[in-house]
Image (spheres, coloured by chain):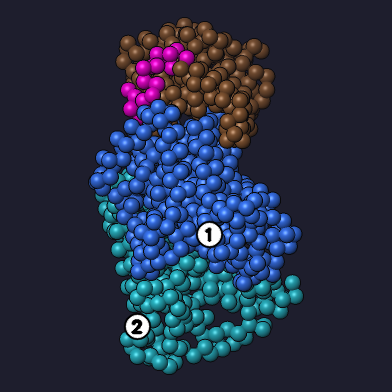
Amino acid sequence: MHAFVTQFWPSTIDGLTIGSIYGLIALGYTLVYGVLRLINFAHSEVFMVGTFASLFTLHGLGITHAETGFALVGVLILMGLAGMAGSGITAVVLERVAYRPLRKRGSSRLAALISAIGASFFLQEVFALRYGRDLLSFPPLMNKTVLFHIGSGQVRADKVLVVVAALVMALALDRFVNGSRLGRGVRATAQDPDTAVLMGVNIDRIVMITFLVGGMMAGVAAMLYGNYFELTQYNVGFLLGIKAFTAAVLGGIGNIRGALLGGLTLGLIENYGGSVFGAQWKDVIAFTVLVLVLMVRPTGLLGEKLTRARA
Amino acid sequence: MRRIGLPDVIGPISDRWSRLPTPARYVVYVIAIVAAFALPADSIGSFMSPQSDWSAILFYPIGVYILLAIGLNVVVGQAGLLDLGYVAFFAIGGYTMGKIGLSLKWDFWVILPCGIAAAAVAGVILGAPTLRLRGDYLAIVTLGFGEIIRITANNLNFTGGPRGLSGIPNPPSVGSFSALQFNVATTKPFYYLVLVMIILAIVLVKRLERSRVGRAWAAIREDEDAAEVMGVPTFRFKLWAFAIGACIGGAAGVLFAAQTISITPEDFPFLLSSYIVVAVVLGGSGNLAGVILGAFLVAWLPERFRGFADYRVLAFGGALVLMMIVRPEGLLPSRRRRAELAEGTGGMGSLGGGVGGAQTQAVRIEAVETDAVQTGAVESEAAP
Amino acid sequence: MTESAALLELRTVTQQFGGVTALSEVDLGVPEGAIFALIGPNGAGKTTVFNLITGVYRPTAGSLWFGGAKISGKRPHEVARVGIARTFQNIRLFDNMSALENVMVGADARHDSSVVGAALGLRRHRREERDGRERGMQLLDLVGITRVAEDTAKGLSYGDQRRLEIARALATQPRLLLLDEPAAGMNPAEKEQLGVLIRKIRDIGVTVFLIEHDMGLVMQVSDRVAVLDFGQKIADDTPSAVRTDPRVIEAYLGAPADAT
């Protein structure tokens, strides 16, 4: 317990940072689950492709050392756009190839989940075979300046960027789903696909947009992850994906605000837990949280929202 | 839906098979067992595995994968529960063998039941709180459980940490038969051992399938709520499926550890769980012959075609997607399972078909009713 | 109202879902050995009553009693073992199992052989399998569909599926059989046969509780009829008395939309 006290502020800061990334990825799970009631198992690979897209952007721009000022902002934006494009396109292609044919003939959801797992392996291996199975490092793009301290915790610029960007993106998504015409289509489809069709909603288009938007959120997360950890790998998505899914369940699957809240909560829990039991137990803690939430409160912290009227 | 050529061949064969008189079927079984015992012959090995020791491959991966697939099939194929962390039971069996064999110096035959029991207990501990979850949640939770076991083995000194356990004793040799001398230099005896276990597992699973247990599992897959109302204690039978699957996985783990002598957490990755899922699904979940064929292919193809080994996961991934699109029932499906998977029953409801497959039982019931009352659906559909 | 000889009793049962009240303080008593019918307009809460009895729902208030023992709070499979079986309004057979297997699932509710017994092929298990098969065939014979015993359930005709559901329910050896609109979708000749079958079931000692829209059938077979309207019981009497009850006529029979 002593470690918990001395490490409280550093754990809090790290927890919120990684939690923001979980939250952004969780948005993709939550959106797709809300509309299709499918765990998009390959969403972790959607994220992985985003990290590679971000990395290649840095290579393409010839970045070798830290940038500052407008150059930094410009590069970050380009990186983010590349990540969103890479992840968004991957998600849409995934839907077309691995899910739509199953959806069209009303296959079992077991079949869809297996297809998702297959797609996940396929994508991982494409990148493993092309770029190797070792860790790939990002060139340092950002000076990890310490802005200020809270207790013993250092508030670093790159961590602030992660948290702020995640909040902004989640807010934008919330506005999109609740405020736009397309967003209404998404909500209508989530609640009652049959009626939505009768009301003239083009389900295929809505599903595509759901995957696209979820993918783009993962793309932003990928950019932030790359900038923060400066590493990626063909299987970088595996653990992050499961944790992001945990975050989505924790917040209440189908619930956009819940996804972010779930991400932050999970990030904090695993970092606090890690400070007590040792960092090597973080993953075990996260999985345990998943099991406990599903047992005790399967509807999550904020309840399920985007899902069907409750059936 | 489009079907790839095979079903036209398989359907009539399986029909004819089921019409064969019992004695004729037993003759076929005996021939199959004799053939299986003759498999390690060099003449077969030179074709099946020109590059490496054929009987070694027959034991691992082929034999062990088949045993694991038979066990997982009870969970996935029979009870319709997707378990993505099956490797956990394999690991528990393996570590039980390693730990007890090293510290207490018991021999294999005593540890085997311990490993099976340990895995069964783990199965019940995992299953009891989670088997009320909707099917897709269960899949993720089991995946998490598999990872917890692996990471825990990696973190604890008790299990040897990342370096694992080594110097695990082989099973004691039996008499002076050369086929029963278990040591590092020989591989055939281990193959015979796994073969015997496979045969026992098949007998066990077949008996259950044809009993009230198998009927209960089938009923649960098709309509869990109706099964419950007809007096099937659905939760208990799902737990049994989990425990039986775990037992077989644990037995495979004990055997594996006793042969390889050293085990590390890296022997039990998520990837192995998914190989076994692929084997079950590829072969035709629910049908033992299909599952065995699936496991054989998954284990043997990469060994036979070493150039292909790098691409094995890629190919499996692609095959899974393709399979689900064109032939979700697998290569050799059971007749019942084929229909279920195609029409979206089979445990989890259909994709985008508006099927609720809701949360825990309690929440689901409430949900259905709320929805029904609101739309008046409970009673309105009748009025002729 | 509720007689002391009632096999099944609902005591001031209220069922709410969210803010909606599906049943409000309903008392019902099903006399042993009777054919009891529950009628009422769509949405009156009839199927909710069945779901309460079979343990699919738990009552918000009130309690349910069967043969003198409380059953509210039991899980569905426990209720089945106590001796209550049902059919479903929208047929819910195990589609890909044969007709006989469907019935055997029901018969298994009375079997005690364990998983271990099945695995080892113990004597009791073998005896129960034989017994389940025999009893299954007898019941298929009772409802008149032995000819399709080996066919998969989903391949059966609509009328045969309804019969199979009844056979499956009877296989659990119930003291009380709940039939949820068994005549739905049947032609007059089939309804006639159904009436005969329901009487036959009562005569072998099974109390029958029937939800039905078809007034002809209800009046023909029932010993007693209760009427639900908007979740409240408005009548509970002999068929002829209910038929002339002004409240019933107003609520149900008089409603032109419901001239079934």
Residue at figure coordinates x 45%, y 54% from the top left: B40
Q: Disc 1 residue type?
A: Thr
Query: Can you give x and y, in whole percent of width and height, for residue A205 in the image?
Result: 28, 57
Mark 2 lies on residue? A57
Q: Is residue B67 above or below residue A251?
A: above
Give the number of the disc on residue B187: 1
- Chain hosting mark 2: A
Residue at figure coordinates x 55%, y 61% from the top left: B186
Chain coloured brown in the rendered structure? C
| Secondary structure mostly taken by the magenta-highlighted segment of the chain | helix
**Who is closer to the viewer here, B81 or A262?**
B81
Question: Badges 1 and 2: C-beta atoms under 8 Å apart?
Answer: no
Q: Look at the image and give the residue range highlighted in magenta.
A: C138-157
**Who is closer to the viewer here, A303 or A241?**
A241
Q: In what quadrant of the picture does the N terminus of chain B appear?
A: top left
Chain coloured blue in the rendered structure? B
Which colour represents chain A? cyan
Badge 2: residue crowd in 10 Å (few <14, some 14–19, many ≥20): many
- Chain hosting mark 1: B
Q: Quadrant of residue A195?
A: top left
